[in-house]
Amino acid sequence: MKSDFPEIQGGGSLILAWQIRNKRVLVIGGGEVAAGRIVKVLNADAKCVVVAPRSGLNDEVAYRVDQKQVEHVDRNFEPSDLDGADMVMCAIDDPEASTQVWKLCKEKRIAANIADVPPECDFYFGSEHRDGPLQIMVSTNGNGPRLANFVRRRIAATLPYNIGTAIQRVGMLRKKLRKVAPNIEEGPKRMAWMIKVSDKWTLEDLCEMTDEDMDGLLGFYKPNTVPSLDEVRLAQPDGAFDGPFLI
């Protein structure tokens, strides 16, 4: 029987934007894979702790340590290192030791990723495209990381060069809008109005939009209209919007 609802495709992962700001993330290992993990952790504004002998650090990890971007424990992993950890990433060339880390994490209910061992992972890393606030991840659920890179490059090649800047500007406008209309009941109207702005204005318009343009545009929120960028600027005599609608 045909259904109008989406077909279920098992075998996938729940892809989320996991907020780990200020969380304590333990990275075990100091090689190339660990270096990549560290960059991802620091980009997410988490507190990164690296456990590995100094002699085993590659140049990049050693740099992070020397710059005090990470906390360094100069020795091999010990079970007590898991105390206080919110997440664990293990990247060492020792399958038995890695499996032991996995088992300990399971006992303590700590989310863990054991590099190159999909069955011993609570989460996977995908191939990521980053442009300011924009993050796009392609995952093959551990089946083909190299293919994920290929797909990610193809997607990135189709994006406008200024998409990251446009998103930043939209984020700034949304923050200003919440100050203009802070009440909870305004939520649906705020969302609908922002959709109108995003649909009417081009990426170039959004990138070019200044703080003064934002303030002028917000003057059209209460009457629930969306002028063009040119119309917003025409309503700003001498570069200052007189705000006839902000009443």
Image: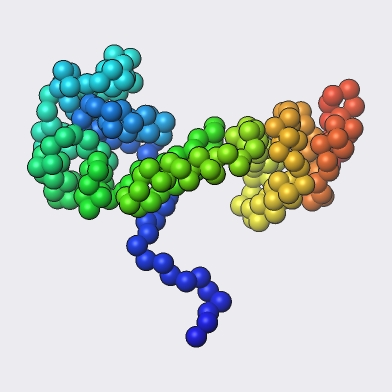
The mark total stands at 0
In the rendered image, is residue 88 in sight?
Answer: no
Q: Residue reaching furthest bottom? A: 1
For residue 16, side relative to residue 83 (left or right): right
Instruction: Tell me which corner region of the image, top left, top right, bottom left or bottom right, holds residue 4.
Output: bottom right
For residue 208, side relative to residue 62 (left or right): right
Front-most of 83 and 185? Answer: 83
Q: Residue at x 28, y 28 (%)?
A: 32
Q: Position of residue 79 (x, y in %)?
A: 11, 37
Q: Position of residue 203 (x, y in %)?
A: 71, 38
Q: Residue reaching furthest top? A: 66
Q: Quadrant of the C terminus?
A: top right
For residue 232, side relative to residue 75 (left or right): right
Q: Residue at x 27, y 31 (%)?
A: 34
Q: Position of residue 70 (x, y in %)?
A: 30, 23
Q: Residue at x 17, y 18 (%)?
A: 54
In the rendered image, is residue 165 in sight?
Answer: yes
